[in-house]
């Protein structure tokens, strides 16, 4: 019999997938309105990103490193500026939404697929995130004004990976504290 926490995780994964896939079913104009609402909410952050202050701070930090590393960091900062930060703010909002949805999904899936011995898995939740991302993009093929994009699958999988890694870290910390407290109990 499955534990209550396992059943709760299944429900949370199902609701997360439902949220992701229902949003993919929205026509482009409705999806744009939702993105516009979020964009207005985070506009102060977007204004800060667009101000160039992040780039200046990163360049100052890069100046602290030796020449070879500094040059690589400068190329990374230039890439960040050209490819990401100079984009239309709605693009950033939409892609951040993809990333964050799949971070949550990856986190929950990693917790769901913990083995009986308490060890965590990596590839099973990753495969599930990839499958969900492909289904997500296929749904968009049938949504008015929307299209499937390989880039979005990559962003989704990256978010899933970050979520899985975050869950693995949380599980490792919990396992460490559990073992530490068990050792303390033995020594008492």
Image (spheres, grey):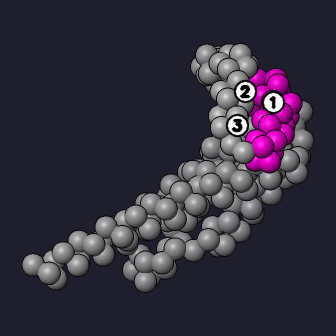
Of circles 3 and 1, the one toward us is: 3
- Seen from this angle, which residue lies furthest left? 188
Q: Where is the N terminus found, in terms of image quarters?
A: bottom left
Q: Is 71 in the magenta?
A: yes
Q: Main secondary structure of the magenta part?
A: helix
Q: Secondary structure at mark 2?
A: helix
For residue 98: magenta? no
Q: Which mark is residue 81?
A: 1
Q: Which residue is mark 3?
A: 62
Q: Position of residue 147 (x, y in %)?
A: 90, 41
Assess whether mark 2 and mark 1 are in contact (beta carbons under 8 angstroms): yes
Q: Nearer the viewer, mark 1 or mark 2?
A: 2
For label 3, the crowd category at 10 Å Cα-Cα, with few meaning under 14, some 14 to 19 and many 20 or more, is some
Question: Which quadrant is home to the C terminus?
Answer: bottom left
Please tell me how crowded label 2 is: few (under 14), some (14-19), or many (20+) other residues with Cα within 10 Å.
some
Across and down, in percent, residue 3 comes to: 37, 72
- Residue 152 shows in the view: no
Q: Residue at image x 23%, y 71%?
A: 181
Q: Which mark is residue 55?
A: 2
At a point 68% along the width and 20% down the height, the residue shown is 53
Distance (Cα) linking label 1 and label 2: 7 Å
Task: Look at the numbered disc 3 and give the secondary structure of its residue.
Answer: helix
Query: Up-down: is 43 above or below 143?
Result: above
Q: Which residues are magenta?
A: 67-92
């Amino acid at each position: 019999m499955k534990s209550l926490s396992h059943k709760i995780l299944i429900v949370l994964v199902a609701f997360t997938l439902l949220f992701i896939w229902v949003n993919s079913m929205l026509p482009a104009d409705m999806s744009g309105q939702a993105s516009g609402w979020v964009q207005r909410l985070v506009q102060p952050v977007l204004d800060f990103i667009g101000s160039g202050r992040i780039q200046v701070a990163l360049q100052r930090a890069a100046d602290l490193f030796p020449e070879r590393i500094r040059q690589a960091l400068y190329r990374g900062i230039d890439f960040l500026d050209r490819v990401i930060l100079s984009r239309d703010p709605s693009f950033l909002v939409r892609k951040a939404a993809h990333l964050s949805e799949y971070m949550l999904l990856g986190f929950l899936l990693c917790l769901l697929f913990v083995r009986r011995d308490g060890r965590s898995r990596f590839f099973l939740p990753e495969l599930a995130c990839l499958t969900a991302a492909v289904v997500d993009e296929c749904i968009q093929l049938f949504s008015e004004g929307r299209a499937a994009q390989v880039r979005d699958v990559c962003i989704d999988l990256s978010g899933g990976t970050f979520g899985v890694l975050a869950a693995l870290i949380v599980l490792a910390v919990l396992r460490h504290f559990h073992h530490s407290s068990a050792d303390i109990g033995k020594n008492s």
